[in-house]
Image (cartoon, rainbow, N blue to C red):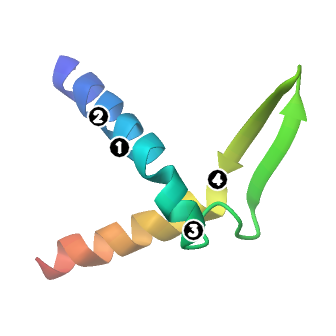
Amino acid sequence: MIRWFVVIIVALVLISGLSPLLQKLGFGRLPGDFRFRLFGREWFIPITSTVLMSVVVGVIAHLI
């Protein structure tokens, strides 16, 4: 269980580090990606981008 926790933390760090690059490519601005302000903070829920990246990673994993 600790291994999965470490994997999730590393994935979140990589995604947050790559988010400026991904936003330049159009991820995060797709229909279905929600961005709103609540309690003085901007919140971002990238539903469509997450599904699209999962499909791409799944296809790449299947090919390898």
Residue sitting at 42 percent across and 44 percent down? 17
Amino acid carrying label 1: it is Leu
Tell me which numbered mark, 1 or 3, is placed earlier along the sequence: 1
Give the residue at mark 3. 24
- What amino acid is at disc 2? Val
Mark carried by residue 46: 4
Q: Are marks 3 and 2 in contact (CB under 8 Å)?
A: no
Mark 3 or mark 2: which comes first in sequence? 2
Task: Please name the residue that numbered disc 2 is placed on.
Answer: 10
Q: Nearer the viewer, mark 3 or mark 2?
A: 3
Where disc 2 sits, the SS reads helix
Q: CA distance from mark 1 to mark 4?
A: 15 Å
Per the model, the C-alpha gap separating discs 4 and 2 is: 18 Å
Image position, residue 54 (x, y; %): 42, 63
The answer to whether residue 48 is left or right of residue 41 is left
Lower position in the chain sequence, tag 4 or tag 2: 2
Q: CB under 8 Å between callouts 1 and 4? A: no
Q: Is residue 59 left or right of residue 37?
A: left
Q: Position of residue 5 (x, y in %)?
A: 29, 23
Q: Disc 4 on helix, strand or loop?
A: strand
Write down the residue under mark 1: 14
Discs 1/4, front: 1
Left or right of 8, for residue 50: right
Q: Is residue 35 above or below residue 25?
A: above
Q: Residue at x 31, y 69 (%)?
A: 58
